[in-house]
Every structure is written in C-alpha cells, then in structure tokens.
Image: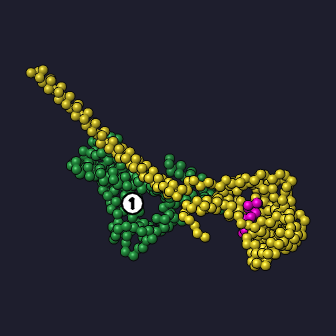
Amino acid sequence: MLKYLMGMVHWLFIVLKIIFQSQKNTTIFFWNKIYKYFCITIISFLYSHLYLRKLILHYQYKYMKQNINLTTLQKTVLITLRILIGWHLLYEGISKLLIPNWSSASFLSESKWILSGFSNWIVTHSEILQIADFLNMWGLVAIGLGLIVGLFTRAAAISGAILLLIYYLNNPPLIGLEYTLPSEGSYLIVSKTLIEAVALFLLAVFPSGYYAGLDRILFGSYRSNHF
Amino acid sequence: MEEKESQKQSSKESVEMKTQAFQKRRTLLKSMLGFPVVGFFAFESLKKWEFEQHKKNNVIESLGLENLNSPVPVKTEPAKPGDLLRIGIIGFGTRGQQLANGLGFMHPSDVEKMEKNNSLQGWLDQEYLNVALVGICDVFDLHAEEGLATAQNEIRPGGNQEVKIPVKRYLRYQEMLADKDIDAVIIATPDHHHARITIDAIKAGKHVYCEKSIALTEEELNEVYQTVRNSNKVFQLGHQITQNAVFQKAKEIVKKDILGRSRW
C-alpha cells in the first residue's frame, strides 16, 4: 500500500519537474535532490525496519537478562553525570537560540578532516545550512531537557553522543591541523568533546532514566530491578 | 489465638500496604527529580540574561548617552499640483542612478532586486516629490539607456503619475542646457567637469544641484561662486550625509563632552 503511494508521489514529482523545466527554477531542482534522499531513507527504513526492530529487541533482552544491582552511590553518580551533561547541552542550545542570527557556518567552514566535504556541502547550500542550524539548536535543547528530566534518556543519550561525535570529527586536535578558532588547554587526539561523547554513550548503556527520571513512572519502575 | 492471628494478618496487610504506598511515593519522588533542576536552570539563565542587560545599560548610563535628543526628521509639505519641476540629469553613472532613486525613479532591474529582498516597500514609502525626469545627458550610450529606462519606469512612490512628459536623451550637455523645457539640472559627472557645467547651467538659466566636489582649482571655484552670486537661480552642493541622524548624534555627543573634551 505504501509502495503504491510512493509510486504515485514519484510520478507527481516527475510531472511537476516537466512543467517547471521550462522556467529553469533552481529551487525545484534542489527539492528534487532532497526528495531523492528522502525516498532513499524512507525505502531503506521500510526494508531495514524489521532488522532494526530485531536489533533493538536483542539488546533489550540482553539488558533484561543482566539483572545488575548497583549500589546507591553508583546510581547517584550516574544520575548526577546525566543531569550535569544534560544541563551543559541545554545551556549550549539555549545560548545559541538567544544569539540573533546564529549560524553554524563559522564552525563548519573550519572543518578539515574526514567531514570536510560534508561540512562544505552544508555551508554552500543556504537552505541546508538553515536546516542544520535549526536541528542543532533545537536538538541540543531537546537532548538537554530529556537528559535532565529523564524522559527517553536512552534516545537522548545516543543522539547526543552522535551529535558530539560529529562536532569532534569537525574539529579534532590532530597533528598537522591548524584552526583559526582558538581553544583553551592542550589536547592531542583526545578532546573534551570526545570525552563528553563517550560519557553520553556510558549514559546510554546504563538505564539512568529508570533509576530516577520520568522514564521510571512512564515506562515501568520494574525495569530498574532487571537491568 | 484466632484473634491474635487475624490481628497479625491485618497488621501484616497494613504494613504491606504501607510499604506499597511508600514505594509509590518514592517512585514519584525519584521520577520528579529533574524538574527542580530545570527550574534552577531557568532561574540561573534569567539571572544571566538580566546581568548582560545590566552591563549594557551600565555603559550607556555612565556615558550619559540616554539624555541625548534624537533628531526629529523634518517633514516637508507635499508639493501643490502645478509646481512640477522638470529635471535633467547630466551624467548617469552610479551616483546619477542613486540620485534618481532618491527623486523617486528606479531602474526596472533594481525594482526586481528590491522585490526579492523585500525592500521595495521601504522605497515606495518615500515621500512623493513633484518632479519629472525629462532629460538624460550622457556620452556613454549604455548609461544613457539605463537612464532612459529609469526615467520611463512607472513604478514610483506615490503611484503612477498621470502627467507623462517624454524623456529625451542628449549627447552633449550644451544641447540639454539649450532646451527650454528643463527647469533644473542635476550634475553627476566626474569631478573635473563640475565647475564648467555648473557655470554654463547657471548662465543658461537653470537651477543646479551639483555633486561634490564643486571644483578642482581655486580659480574655478571663484568663477562658480561669482556666477551663482550674480544670478537668482537655486544652487545646492551635494553634501547630504551631514543630514544623517548619525551625524546629529555625534554632534550632540561632542557638545556634551561625553567622550572627553575634544581638541581641534
């Protein structure tokens, strides 16, 4: 059923493209490209959905079998770490919201390592830059709030870790890379962003939301006894 | 015995129920852990925002800048019908184009550009001056074409005007000055032509708006001064930026010694 819908939408776009081809409207070509990527992600999701589900259930089963019981001190430290990292990311997001016309272009234009091509593509297309700015600002706010309050902590932690990894890969303190943005401290390969990313991965593998957080009442406190 | 057992059972049940309620309260407290943190975060960020504002205001207060009088823009009365001023532009380069924009005439491609930037309405809101661009004089054909397109464009502040005078293109300024249908002349040529063209225009009986600078040598300047003095025509030199609000504010700041006593 979905495949038929997709087919119809695809034909609609082809017709629109033929209609607008004479006007040589560049925005239509841009949305065409976005539509292609959108189709690819949707189709890959539809096909891999079942495999993703299997992966998630596999890890849930593993976690449920684990039956670890942490001491109160261990839980307290985990929860404190979660709240502090959440506060940090929330303030980063909000401070960007309060600056008028903040853009990530200045940060992305300095990217020199693996993600330099990707960052260059974002910076040169202004519509994609707008999307990236929006996702950055509101993503940081959402992840920060989720971590502090304890709602969907695992999802927030994983997405925060991926985001911070992207920040790290755009600005790694490796030998031979010179940046114009000044940074404090002396780093070699390992930077604070990388450490925070791995700390978020730590928060993802421990169910800190179920020990103390909104996840506890929403999705069952019994899970805290099994993980 | 039975009473004691039942009592023990009921007490056990009540203890169980108490621990259940206790557990529920504990669960609720544990899950609400994040909210006071969010409240504290909001409080602190508000404090920080107020601190930044206070810092900004501190600078303004200590310099005494809030007591400056902002200059009030002077509104001229709209011209009565019948006072139409027919203007010719000598030299339609970049400055000529800008002066025409100020008069209320814009080139069609510039209109499109402003429409894309959403700045067209700001230009259309400018005051309607009862003028008509009647002559374009330029030796460069490309500039003259742009001038004609600008003068004939119907999109103007105050709407499309009914009185349409055909626009003429002249190659030499002497031809334009000989034309009886032109009341005033705007001189926007390169600097070295200003003095000669001004003198000829005043002698031909036209009012003159001349772009700065007026002359290159002292002799030219004196000749222009004598010519204008001996005629009854209106002459204005194009120093316009001193009317800008920035200059008025700077004048106030210097007058009130806000940046310290200035020594000239």
Mark yes or no: residue B52 visible.
Answer: yes
Q: Position of residue B185 (x, y in %)?
A: 82, 66
Q: Is residue A128 above or below residue B4?
A: below
Mark yes or no: residue B92 visible.
Answer: no
Question: Which chain does tag 1 point to?
Answer: A
Is B77 within the magenta?
Answer: no
Instruction: Answer left or right for A29 relative to A42.
Output: right
SS label for mark 1: helix
Residue under the point 73% across and 72% down: B213
Residue under the point 57% across and 67% down: B262
Instruction: Identify which residue, B180 or A212, lies in the foreground.
Output: B180
Instruction: Identify which residue, A87 or B231, lies in the foreground.
Output: B231
Residue under the point 60% across and 53% down: A12
* Chain identity for the colour green used in the image: A
For residue B202, what is the image quadrant?
bottom right
Which region shows up in magenta?
B94-103
Residue under the point 50% across and 48% down: A2
**Quadrant containing the C terminus of chain B in the rendered view:** bottom right
Is B97 within the magenta?
Answer: yes
* Chain identity for the colour yellow used in the image: B
